[in-house]
Structures are given as C-alpha cells and as structure tokens.
Image (cartoon, grey):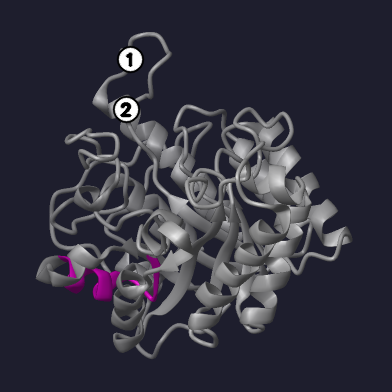
Amino acid sequence: MRADPPGLNRRALLVAPIGLAACDRFASARTTRGPLAPPLKDLAPFPFGATGMTWQLDQADWVEQTLRHCSQLTPEWEQKMERTLGPGFTYDFEPSDRVVAFARDNGLRVHGHTVIWYSQGADVFDDAKLSRARFGAEYDRYITAFVGRYRGRMAGWDVVNEPVAEDGDGLRDCHWSRALGMDGYMVRAFEQARAADPDAVLFLNEYNLENIPRKGATFLKLVERLLRLGAPIGGIGTQSHLDIEIPAGQITALMRDAASLGLPIHVSELDFPMERDGGRMPDLRSAAQKRAQQVARVGELAEAFMALPERQRYAFTTWGLRDSDSWLVREEGKNRPDESALLLDAQGRPNPAYQAVAEAFAS
C-alpha cells in the first residue's frame, strides 16, 4: 500500500461515520446533503478512475469533478468499434485521440476500452461474406493499428470484452468465433495487442461475474484455459454492474476466486442501480431499503478489493463519475432520469455508497 501524501489523513476525509448492522456492516449509512465529497483519488491506495466522453470535455463542471476525483480515465464510447471502424475497413480514431489527449494533458493515466467485443463489428467483419484469410488479415490489421496508435501511452486495454454467455453456460457465439474459432479469436487478439503495445496490461473483461456465480466460474476457467494456450492475458476485468439484491458474501467469493489466478484485477465499470430491470415482480422496496442494499453491496466490493495483494489492485473505476453522468440516466441508455447508481450525486456530493467505499479504502 502506498504511503499517504504528506499531511493527508485518509480517515479524516470521510464524510460521516458508517453505522454497523448485524449482518451487513454498511447497511445503515444515510443519505448526506452537504459539501462536495473529498477526492476519491486521495482515499484510494491505487488508481481511482471513471469514464469520459468527448462532449463532456467541454463541460467545466465535469472537468472540475473528474480532475478532483480521478487519477485514471476510461473512454466510455470513443474506442468502441461502432465509432472507430467504418465501411470498407476504414478507421476513425479522432474522438479516441481527443479523450486520450485530455487525460494525458491533465496527468491521468488511460485505460483503453475496448478492442474486440461480440456485439460490434459484424457489419464490416461479415463472416458470411469475407474469406477466412481476409477476415483474419483485417482482424490483425485493426488491432495493430488501434492498439499500436497509443503504444506506450496506455496503462492497459480491455482486449476482449464479454466473451461468456449471458447465463454463464459456455461462451458467446459471434462473428469473431465463427471465423477464427471460439478460443482462437481471443488468443489471436491478445497476441496482436501484445505485439502492438508490449508494456500495456491486457485484460479480459466481463460483467455479471459477482451477480451470477456460474458465470464467474465459467469466466475464470476461460482465463485459465487461454493462459494455457499462450494468450498473454495480463489482468482480469470485472465490470461490477452490481445487482444490489444479491446475497451478502457473493462478491467476496468472486473476488477471492479471481485473486487465486495471481493476475491484476480491475473493477472496471462499477455502478449499482436502484431500479430493477424488467422481468421481476413489482418493486415494493422503499428508497431507504434500496439505499441500504446499495451501501452493503458496494461496501463489500470495496473491502474485497482492498483485501487483494497490492500488486493485484490495478484500479477501481466507476462507469460515470456522478449520477448525472451515468449511462443509466441517458435516453440512449436505460433512460432512467431518477436513477442514482454512482458514488456522487449530480453536484458532486457524496451518495451513501461513497461512505462505504471511503471507509473500506481507509482500512
């Protein structure tokens, strides 16, 4: 663990003490409405990050809060293939360049997201029309051009994103796997990324690992198998879009199992929505119950991350910094304008889960 900067007492920066409940020690934290939250980057003994988009770079309040709290930035959309890849295998990295330049100009390290993702690229990488030779050659060329463009400037990359089936029963079938093989497309992506940027930490990134134990187990077995096949995987990314109603202890178990592989771990896309997705019974929980569930689960995640060996704590990243920055509130996302799923409210004041994270980081 790093030493605190001179004169900084991380415990003294906590917004308020956290009450302890019999089963979930964070469950009684209350909403606060007071001053701006103390900087998260000063509380965390590892990089603390959030996401950024080009339109946010022109918002003075976003810039102020991001530089106040963050030591790392992840481009939220600008490095996804729907933005970087055009018809005929043309590339446009200008938006990505802007976010990377902003981060580096302001002393933030950058985590790249994402190179290969099952949900994008099929309109150009059409496995039904392209020969296998052309598909493979363009696959290699894209990874080399994209990752190599930032050689030496990125802390790490999400090289392959979300390869495991939704319920954890095997892997996703997609245009990449049909053309290059289920394991083959992943091994090849990591090999090409390593050649393009030998110093970046290369991640396999996935969601619902804490929420669905079967998916977490499948993911970790996949990491082990790819390593045996020679893939230069350097880290594990758990997105941590947390279901706040999962049982206590489930997050800790996943983090413990992931740590056993010895790789750096990135909490890469943390948020914790209060609203349920469709398909469940009507939600009769009170706002206080939802907040208590949030605080308990986020506190457990932060404690489990802190329990990792120092060398395995790559970074702790939230998907958006303030509630108003979240994809959950935007029309093109979940369109939930009242959602509160991040550590800070729209004004940069601490939400209840902030207290749980701060307490865990100070332990």
Q: In this view, does 320 lie above or below 171?
A: below
Determine the secondary structure under disc 2.
Answer: loop
* Quadrant in the picture for the N terminus: bottom right
Determine the secondary structure under disc 1.
Answer: loop
Upstream in sequence: badge 2 or badge 1 = 2
> Can you name the residue that lies furthest to the top here?
281
Q: Which residue is drawn at 74% across and 33% down?
A: 170
- Where are the magenta residues, as a range? 62-74
- x, y percentage for residue 9? 37, 77
Q: Residue at x 20, y 38 (%)?
A: 331
Q: Name the residue under label 2.
A: 275
- x, y percentage for residue 249? 62, 36
Q: Mark 1 points at which residue?
A: 283
Label 2 and label 1: CA atoms lie apart by 8 Å
**Left of 62 or right of it: where is 86?**
right
> Can you name the residue that lies furthest to the bottom here?
6
- x, y percentage for residue 102? 28, 80
